Image (spheres, rainbow, N blue to C red):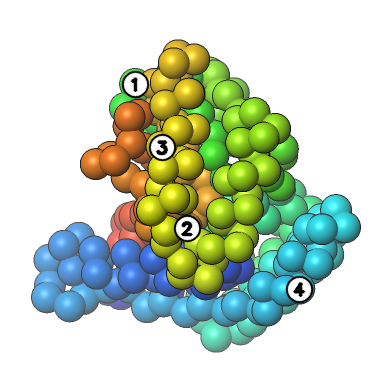
Amino acid sequence: MTQPLHIGIVACSAEGAALCYRTICTEGAGLLDRPHAHPEVSMHTPSLAGYVACLDRGDWGGVAELMLTSAQKLAAIGADFLICPDNTIHEALPQLLPRSPRPWLHIAEVVAAEAQQRGFRRLAVTGTRWLVDSSVYPVALERRGLQWQRPSDADRDETNRIIMDDLVYGRFKPASVTTFQRVIDGFKRDGCDAVVLGCTEIPLIIDDSNSSLPTLDSTRLLARAALRKAIAERD
């Protein structure tokens, strides 16, 4: 039997990367129709502090170099293609791709494809302030004719604080859930028909069961896209 492709995970923050890794490993069996089966998966994670230092000074070139280092290490141990379960640092991906040793799946493109397939038209974008201020989702969504909306400045600051001070450390507080629910409720009043959970930790506290809008879980959508690619393009 031919083997699925080897998935390389370029990780940034631990909780989102862990959810992505876990999804690949637990959902692989269903696609491969074999108990406990999943593609080979490798992950490399530099210190999150290095990424945050680059982000704080707006050094996207530095972010790209950190991602490239992970990509090279993963390629060296056999990864066939790469994914990054961190929406924010995708802003640096265009600088990295010309030098990348392996092809990538782009998280925002995966989410945009899912939104289009499900018939959504106007998406709310949540995530770190770096992400919602960036072009990562606008470019991917507009390419598919989809509209989008960012949070207010105050909401960007508060959700960014929750993500960086609590979620990335695995601290999931009821007050954080309430804040995200309030922000999503505001998006719904403004006419959005779905919300992008655009930080890979947000799905750990928000999903369709407690959101007033349908959710697009960027973490699991990327993991599932990687699974499909690994299996469909197996040797």
Q: Earlier in the sequence, mark 4 or mark 1?
A: 4
| Residue corresponding to mark 1 | 119
Give the alpha-carbon distance from disc 4 to disc 2, as whole Å: 19 Å
Kind of residue sitting beneath label 1: Gly
**Residue sitting at 60 percent across and 63 percent down?**
165
Q: Earlier in the sequence, mark 4 or mark 2?
A: 4
Kind of residue sitting beneath label 3: Gln
Give the alpha-carbon distance from disc 3 to disc 2, as whole Å: 15 Å
Q: For the residues carrying marks 2 and 1, which lies nearer the camera in this image?
A: 2
Q: For the residues carrying marks 4 and 3, which lies nearer the camera in this image?
A: 3
Classify the position of the N terminus by image quarter.
Answer: bottom left
Q: Nearer the viewer, residue 220 or 34?
A: 220
Left or right: where does residue 107 sit relative to residue 57?
left
Q: For the residues carrying marks 4 and 1, which lies nearer the camera in this image?
A: 4
Q: For the residues carrying marks 1 and 3, which lies nearer the camera in this image?
A: 3
Residue positioned most to the bottom:
77
